[in-house]
Amino acid sequence: MKVSKTAVILCLLVLAAACGTVQAAEFSRTFLLEAGARYEVSVRIRTSLEDAPTMAAVYIHNEHGQYLRSTQLSRSLAGPQEWQQISTIVTAPPGATHATVVFTAPEGVEMEWDEFNIRRIQLDLADEILIEQGLVYTGLIVDARGLGLQRGMSPRIYSESGQLVYAGVAVSYEFLQEAGIVSYGQDLTPELLRRIQPKNTVKVSPLVVRALGVSGTTESNVIISDDDAQAILDALDVYDFLAHYSVVFLID
């Protein structure tokens, strides 16, 4: 009986969930992309083989499932039996909504499922001097007062044309539980401003946008204008405050 590639992947995912590692072959994961963001995708693997060619491939699609682009990283690993990390960087192009990362390796290579990470990374153009001079935005404030916005664990920001701008895609479960990907308040208090204040600085320079409406079954997502969405993307080219979850929602 011929077994499909999809069935093989599903079996590997079950194994990963049960024991935390998979023996070679292939596994994949699909994740959302936030507009203009860069991500490091990595997994830990180990082998006792003298030569173990591995590959990480990321396939990027739009909301209709159409393929936009891909990036691949090939690497040859050798023993001894020690955990090593293989990673690749992906940047969300215009119109991208999600990506699927696929790691492949020959038999005799272990992949540690528990150490499969997707981490949003920021550009290297901003530093403390730019922040102190007020030449960059250090965070985002979305004024959603009067719209009935509800608090949520994983709120999202969409442009009016449907582009996902922010969802805290790469946030860890621990950070989500302890701090959340946004802070809420009726007015800008010193406590809320500290959310958008970079460490080791005293400068706070927020980008303020007005929400046009709310969405989602729990009414916890906000919709902003396309112009404001573009202003956020332009600001992220200099300093990616969304990578630090420096976001405040003003609500009733």
Image (spheres, helix red, strand yellow):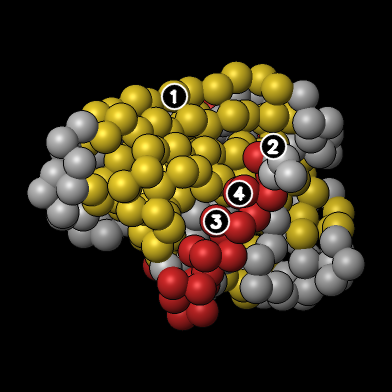
Q: Is residue 249 visible?
A: yes
Given residues 37 and 53, the one toward you in this image is 53
Disc 2 and disc 4 in contact, CB within 8 angstroms: no
**Residue 89 to residue 120: above or below:** above
The residue identified by callout 3 is: 12
The residue identified by callout 2 is: 97
The residue identified by callout 4 is: 9
Dividing the picture into quadrants, the one containing residue 148 is: bottom right
**Residue 222 to residue 195: above or below:** above
* Number of numbered discs overlaid on the protein picture: 4
Q: Secondary structure at mark 3?
A: helix
Q: Residue furthest bottom?
A: 178
Residue 15, x across and y down, in percent: 52, 65
Q: Secondary structure at mark 4?
A: helix
Residue 222, x across and y down, in percent: 77, 55
Q: Amino acid at mark 2?
A: Thr
Q: Calculate the distance from the C-alpha at mark 1 to the C-alpha at mark 2.
A: 19 Å
Q: Secondary structure at mark 2?
A: strand
The residue identified by callout 1 is: 72
